[in-house]
Amino acid sequence: MRFSEPEYAEITPELAERIERFREEHAGDPVGDVANTILFEDERVRIWEMKLEPGEHSDLHEHKHDYYLVVMSGDLVAGVTPKDSPMDPFVGKIPPEGNTVPVPKGGVEWAFNVGEKTYHEFLIELKNT
């Protein structure tokens, strides 16, 4: 496992269309959880696990605190932002050995597995940030 800046994939016209269709279909989604399951929580941290099969997505979620994402497996995962977001959607490339990346608080997005492999990550939420 390494710690490095995320790498981003080129968003092809086909992928841009898929992401835009997703945004339209999910425009009314309520804000939910940042991942699937809470594994541990105390006064300082909350540790989540998320698994997304190809084509699956997370809830629309807000990063209310700073996080570290410990990405175990996958190939391509999109961060799909709502249409009114100041941030554009992006597609992260998952290295074969995984990756650990920091995520600052403030973003609102869906995680959408646009790849061909199961996406698996642990999220470490720093509650005091």
Image (tube, rainbow, N blue to C red):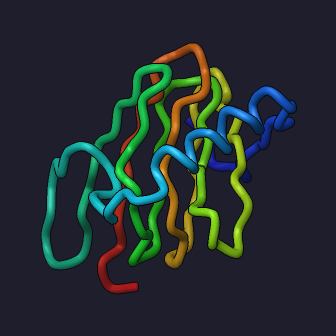
Residue 104: horizontal and vertical position, in percent?
Answer: 56, 73
Q: Residue at x 40, y 77 (%)?
A: 65
* Residue 17 position (above or below residue 124): above
Residue 22 location, quadrant: top right
- Report the front residue among 49 and 25: 25
Q: Measured from the top left, where is residue 86 in percent x and y?
A: 70, 75
Q: Residue at x 58, y 14 (%)?
A: 116
Q: Quadrant of residue 33?
A: bottom left
Percent across and percent down for residue 55 are 49, 24
Q: Quadrant of residue 50?
A: top left
| Quadrant, the C terminus | bottom left
Q: Residue furthest top?
A: 116
Identity of the residue drawn at 74% across and 35% down: 17
Give the vertical position of 68 relative to 93 (above or below). below
Q: Residue furthest bottom?
A: 128
Question: In x, y percent, where is residue 39?
Answer: 16, 48
Query: Residue visible at 59% across and 36% down?
Result: 77
Q: Is residue 22 left or right of residue 47?
A: right
Nearest the viewer among 52 and 7 is: 52
